[in-house]
Image (spheres, rainbow, N blue to C red):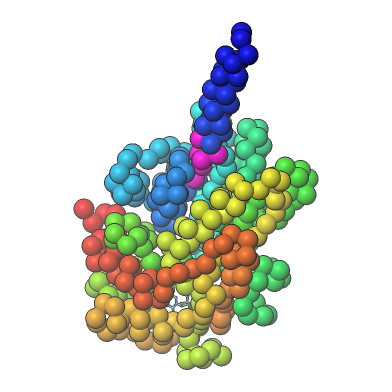
Amino acid sequence: MKAPLQWGVFFCLKIALDINMENYKNKILVTGGAGYIGSHTCIALHEAGYEVVIYDNLSNSSFEAVNRVSSLIGQPIDFIEGDIRDADSLRQVFAAHQFFGVIHFAGLKAVGESVAKPLMYYDNNVSGTITLLKIMAEYEVKKLVFSSSATVYGDPEILPINEDSPRSCTNPYGQSKLTIEHVLEDLALSDNSWSLIPLRYFNPVGAHPSGQIGEDPNDIPNNLMPYISQVAVGKLDQLSIFGDDYATVDGTGVRDFIHVTDLAQGHVAALNYLKQQKQSLGFLPINLGSGKGTSVLELVRAFSAVAAQDIPFQFVGRRAGDIASCYASADKAQELLGWKASLSITDMCQDTWRWQSINPNGYNSI
Ligand code: NAD
Ligand code: UFG
């Protein structure tokens, strides 16, 4: 081959390789992607140029959510129905796609249910994650963003809570998250080629601004925001506020509510950060919260104003296991990921209300 021709072939090959590398860098496996936070994150990932493959057993979600994500992004989304405890099924997925990394939402999340069925929670959440990690190792995919929770901080001694705060849990759900964090820490210590980012979410609320996707609890909601919105839409009679004697601004519990679309952007920021790194990160926990505390009564009043109606409520005793106040220091997310929550409590209430009004029975409304 003549020299100019050789150079031509070389450059063509290099461009093809670069395009291939870019594609590979963009493909993400999203376990639990049909769920509440996962569905919003899939949209944010698509908008940021990532290619998404959802893997979900639909144990706590509806295929309708996947349909709606596809409509919102204007193209079909790749969906595989499967369980993270099923190693063979995961192997098939990893053999068929070359992933840059995994965002791992799949898990059970109801605190009360976890107390009644601890084995189910440890099996699903902990064993499932271990199976996923083993298959990732087999296929040399060693970048993971994991859905952890502020619950790993237990009852915090110091507020706002930063990532170095002591960790402890009081229920099997929380223990499953903390155990997974310990597994990830040990894995990172054993092999420095892993990058493992547990994102510790504070209180995710809100819905996509289109009103097409949102939180769709199976039974009577355990969490505050879906309870309020179901009272507002007339499905439930009144809210019970658990405790009015906490040492807080008005005696009710204080939490760090974060809009689910802000949370979704936090995942995009974590992936972008992973992409920029020349070296592996090991175990790198990061809080995703707004950094602001809002009381239960403040949230009820904000929702009332948005929905232009009273939310009937009564004060009842404290709920076992609840803490008075919990809000994040979100400095690490801003410093490392350049991410900061941008949406207000009013935005959270407006988007929840839009979703609930259009879909009074969630994804079963049609
Ligand atoms: P979700 O229940 O809506 O979504 C979880 C998804 O995982 C569901 O679609 C479910 O079908 C799927 N799933 C569960 N077990 C699975 C398995 N074995 N194999 C495959 N798929 C499985 O919950 P969410 O609110 O979107 O939460 C996502 C993650 O974030 C969970 O891990 C949860 O523990 C964590 N988290 C949630 C909150 C919150 O308040 N929503 C707070 C902190 C952390
Ligand atoms: N609350 C009520 N009435 C209700 C529901 C809740 O007064 O019907 C109060 C609670 O007592 C608490 C506040 O509203 O003071 C928030 O309660 P949520 O159940 O909405 O949220 P939690 O802070 O208890 O827990 C949530 C998730 C956990 C997660 C944690 C931190 O449920 O899984 O946030 O991310 F671990």
Q: Decide if residue 313 is on the left or right side of residue 266.
A: left
Seen in the picture, residue 104 relative to 154 is either above or below; the reply is above
Residue 14 or residue 41, whichever sits in front: 14
Residue 271 or residue 245, whichever sits in front: 271
Q: Residue at x 61, y 73 (%)?
A: 329
Q: Can residue 28 be found in the magenta stretch? A: yes
Residue 269 appears in view: yes
Q: Residue at x 47, y 72 (%)?
A: 257
**Magenta residue span:** 23-30
Seen in the picture, residue 126 relative to 199 is either above or below; the reply is above
The image quadrant that residue 141 belongs to is top right
Residue 123 appears in view: no
Seen in the picture, residue 202 relative to 194 is either above or below; the reply is below
Seen in the picture, residue 40 relative to 333 is either above or below; the reply is above
User: Where residue 32 appears, x then y in whole percent?
Assistant: 47, 48
User: Where residue 320 appears, x then y in whole percent?
Assistant: 54, 77
User: Where residue 91 appears, x then y in whole percent?
Assistant: 56, 31
Give the tally of numbered discs. Answer: 0
Q: Residue at x 73, y 48 (%)?
A: 188
